[in-house]
Amino acid sequence: MAQADQPAAGGSGGAATTPVPAPPGIQPEPAQPQGDLLTLKEALRFALQNNLDIELARYQPAISEEVLRGAEGIFDPLLFADYDYSHDETPIASAIVDGVSASGGGTARSTINTDTGRWDAGLSGVTSLGLEYSSQYEFSRNRSDSPFANVDPEYNAQWVTLVTLPLLRDLVTNDASILVARSSIARDRSYDDFQADLTDLLVETERRYWGLAAARANTRVATKSLETASELLEQTRVQYEVGVVSRVEVVQSEAGVAQREFELIVAENAEGAAHDQLLNAVFAPGERVFEERTVITEKAVFVDYEVEVGVATAKALELRPELASARSLVDDARLQLDLAENQVLPTLDLVGRYQFDGLSGRSDDPNTIIPNNRKESYDKFFRNDGNRSYTIGAQFSIPIGNQVARAAETEAEIGFRRAKTSLRREEQKVLLEVRKAVRDLASSIEGIQAAERNRVAQSETLDAEQERLRLGDSTPFQVLQHEEDLAQAERQLIRSLQVHRDAIADLDRAQGTLLDRLNISVRDQLTR
């Protein structure tokens, strides 16, 4: 098994006076890690593949894409068609009808039977300009035994085209076009939100990774401290048996061992909790994995990461997905305001209508006049010599007072101002985060240096005190105190290195460069 304090080859060591080098790109189909050693690169890769939080976050962009596609479908033309057949029996009591029937050689009748078949088809829709259109063709075939029906069967055809073009209200800026534009903005926002979720996951995974590394290091310190205290206890007991020290010093040594046993228990418990948190983030494991799998992390090492506040701020204002999302909200509010301002305008629509009518059929009466081979029986619709008509005009309307539209406009204007204020607040928040991240990184570097100096000093002090004990000029209690000081200094150094690595991840997140550093594509992660 690899040792916890042994860095993996190609790990996350630093480069002098340059930003943290980007590790190799995360592959979409990662292999299982070899053995129990889990490098930071592997932990991030597995988190992207297995973490349930990011899996849930992947759904929203896909949903937003379908919402946009559905909104764009409002401009799809509607093709329609229908058919109906009707049979009518009309009762009559008319001497005129009886007389006509008798003159034609028929008999008197009490009903008139009519059979009609009607076919109707057409196309309608709306464009992003607000233009509404429809073109409809209707054809009917009528048969009747009425003595007044000179044409039997009779064929009627009608083609009607209607166009309505708004000139003021709903021109370009209308409910349909705004819906599509807002859906597009919502889709883009979902990508920005996913990028923010992705960044948060990576930062949290790094934190848990270095948290486990620190917990394991603290366990080693506690184990070493217990071993030292146990050796001192054995030495004190031997001295007590030969009469060099008193029983009190033996009791003090025993108390020191008991205290360090308790500290080891606490450290091991913290390590177990950190291990579970990392497993949960990286593998989304079941119960058996929690029980059976043990991972070992790399050792946290110092990374020389130089950054200027001005440069980091400029990157953050350009790259942070939270700012992109806030800008999208401003754009969305602007669209709503544009629509509200448009709806205040009066309605002025240009309306056009074109109609073509055709009539044909069969008649045995030489005096019957119908167009198109009037004596010929045929089933064609109509020929190009039917009756034509067209209409063009304008429609104007406006509500008196127009309070509904004006109230909606005022509400939309307030919403637009609120969105811009929210954007400025988000920018201010980002600036503070960047400045804090830069300070935290600088502080972590200084903290590591101070902690290392303290550790060296405490180590030398303990060595000197142990030598004094050997010469009889000190007591086990004093040695235990200095040993505890050394253990505390080592824990402080471990914590400083953990804070340092966390500060690097926080700074990359604050300035929006974490995904670039890790060579992770948002689009690739959406298609996993």
Image (spheres, helix red, strand yellow):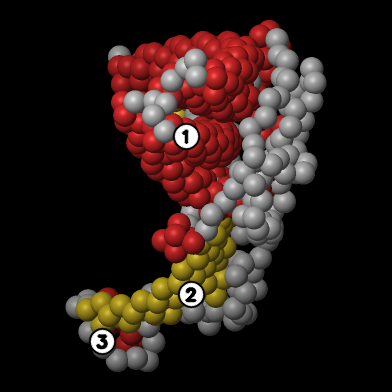
Q: Quadrant of residue 369?
A: bottom right
- Describe the element under mark 2 as helix, strand or loop: strand
Relative horizontal placement of residue 206, taking residue 288 as reference (left or right) = right
Crowd rating for badge 1 (residues with CA inside 10 Å; few <14, some 14–19, many 20+): some
Disc 1 secondary structure class: helix
**Residue extending furthest toward the left:** 93
Q: Compare marks 2 and 1 and give the one earlier in the sequence.
A: 2
Residue 418 sits in quarter: top left
Q: Which is nearer the eye, 116 or 271?
A: 271
Relative to residue 319, is residue 403 drawn left or right? left
Quadrant of the image for the C terminus? bottom right
User: Which percent across, then down, holds residue 257?
Assistant: 39, 35
- Earlier in the chain: of badge 3 and badge 1, it is 3
In this rendering, the label closer to the viewer, 2 or 3:
2
Residue type of the residue flagged with mark 1:
Gln
The location of residue 198, given as percent across then percent down, is 57, 38
Query: What residue sits right under mark 2 in the picture?
Result: 141
Q: Name which residue lies at 71% across and 14% down.
A: 307
Q: Which residue is mark 3?
A: 109
Image vertical order of residue 121 relative to residue 56, above or below: below
Discs 3/1, front: 1
Q: Residue 235 has which mark?
A: 1
- Determine whether the residue tagged by mark 3 lies in a helix, strand or loop: loop
